[in-house]
Image: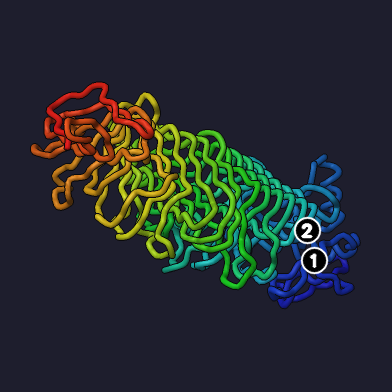
Amino acid sequence: MNGWTWLGSAALLSGIVLLGGVTLFSDSRSSDTTPEPMSQSLTDSDMLQANTYARSNNSMQDIENKFVTQNQEGYLASWFATPDIKQDQVLKLQAGYDYATSKGKPFIIDGVYHIKANRTYIGTQNVGLIIRDNSDLRFTPHAKLKLISENNEVYNIVVARDVDNYKISNPHLIGDRLTSKARDGEWGYGLTIYESSNGYIEKPVIENVWGDGIYIGKEWGTKSKQVPTNITVVEPFVSGARRNGLTLASGDNVNIIRPRIQKVGDSDGIEGTWPKACIDVEPEGAEGAPPPRIVNSVIESPTCKGSYWGMSTSIFRDDIEVSLHIKGKTTLSNLRAGVGFYLSGADNTGRILIDELYYKTPTDLTPMSLAWNKASNLDLEINKVTYLHGGADFGITSSDIITKFPGKQFGNVTINNIQAGGEISYTLPEESDFIINGYKFLADEKNSKGISIRQKSTSTSLGGKDTVIGSQGTVVKTGSDISSVKFGNEIWVEPSASNRRFKEPSVSTLGDYRKLKIGLSPSTKTTGNSCNIKGLKIKKANGFSTTAQSKTPDCWIELQNTEGGETKIFDSYGAWTFN
């Protein structure tokens, strides 16, 4: 072997150990071990011996000759490893990648390579290819890394951890979802970006992983306060992830540009695992570890299709900072459920801003699920919702995922400019004793049907000065009294048959000095119901009337209270009585 010394099979288990005691990489490190520096000081002689281990039929001189004579931009994987065979090539690829990086050149995956992900790196289990500092990893158009399944519940096909300044171009990673015999677990990741900095990933393609296509966050249980920082992922495409297409769990200045995600969750006869979302925003980490955070981050123009959830935001911990802008149009199509926003943690800070949710097709289940704890100082704002599918209704439901937290008040949510072809509705929580105190839902001005409120529990109420439902007509389907100041200036009461167990609701106009139009909804199906209005001051012979009532179908009245004065009646329809 050209005078080289074979290191033996033990090196296979512990890493490539070079003569002179230099370690090129190791696959067994404890979580407290500081990563050894990359091979900046390695000599050609060292690399020569590394290549003996990597591929004995190419000497280092052969490789250098190829680099010069073939006029390559970087070092080709095929000079180190063997493509198109179902044998683990990960150590050979790692050796070539490390060598190219030590030379300051790109490493180019130029074929289909099968790899295992069963090493441990800085406490991260079951890793495949490990990203290095100051490296440039590229894939040719037909190149792939295919995972050799070992039926593991946890794996990372490519992982970046404790590294700085790296670039990955056009990676194509294929997991084992279709063949794995694992019975549980959800942590089989394609591209894992843990605590690292200045990473640029261009057009990754990730298919059929057991867990998440791309995971960006802190390694679970790490004591480090660091998060992925200055990370850019351009036009990722994820298909066939079992848990999530893309998870953003921690990051500072993370930019995800035009992600396209499909077929997440249940597919190909294989059951997915929750939340089964194309995009999951979920600040998470082990209890007792430094808290996660998502700050100064952007997801731009995502496309979510053919999955269970389009997007899920779940924040269950306290003292979390989230500053996230979901920019441009979020396109949602062929989904079981649309989007879910859940916040139960307290004392959080920041803002999640979404420019537009565009539903290209109607959802099978709820278009939007919402439960947002007012005790947190984290705001959710959606500037526009488009749900135009003939007469299809757009419903916002209150999730029962979050029912246990102090105060039991929902708030700090604004949804502007809701456009829908059918009815827009919000269903109050079924769980008792909740107060909606700070939800603002505003229909598009052209939507004449307004927003309807549905109530299942008599002890759940709308309250607080910050709650506003509807900029146009609002249909209130409830058995509880409501205040007009919580709604737009056109309110239609609908005590439908399903509400007969409740008392008939009344609308209080106390403290509301706008010109109002209040009436019995034309969609009311049950005859004999009445529209009841309180808080008036209408002069009569022996004093003032403070209430108005009508049982005429489709009745309405236009009125305006004056501060310190009487109520003015402008117009009405139906027979009204004043008391």
The C terminus - image quarter: top left
Task: Evaluate whether residue 105 shows in this view.
Answer: yes
**Residue pointed to by mark 2:** 98
Q: Residue at x 87, y 72 (%)?
A: 19
Instruction: Pick the residue in front: 380 or 175.
Output: 380
- Left or right: residue 343 versus residue 577 is right
- The percent coordinates of residue 210 (x first, y second) are 49, 59
Helix, strand or loop at label 2? It is helix
Residues at marks 1 and 2, CA–CA distance in whole angstroms:
7 Å
- Left or right: residue 530 versus residue 462 is left
Q: Check if mark 1's residue and mark 2's residue have beta carbons within 8 Å.
A: yes
- The percent coordinates of residue 101 (x first, y second) are 80, 54
**Residue pointed to by mark 1:** 24
Q: For residue 415, which quarter of the picture?
A: top left
Residue 70, disc: none
- The percent coordinates of residue 172 (x first, y second) are 59, 48
Q: Residue at x 17, y 24 (%)?
A: 573
Instruction: Give the crowd class for mark 1: few <14, some 14-19, many >=20 residues within 10 Å.
Output: many
**Which color scheme did the rendering employ for the protein?**
rainbow
The single residue placed furthest to the bottom in the displayed view is: 10
326 up-or-down from 133: above or below = above
Q: Residue at x 50, y 48 (%)?
A: 279
117 up-or-down from 557: above or below = below
Q: For residue 417, which quarter of the picture?
A: top left
Under mark 1, the amino acid is Leu
- Left or right: residue 539 versus residue 439 is left
Q: Residue at x 64, y 56 (%)?
A: 193
- The percent coordinates of residue 475 (x first, y second) are 27, 36
Helix, strand or loop at label 1? It is strand
Under mark 2, the amino acid is Asp
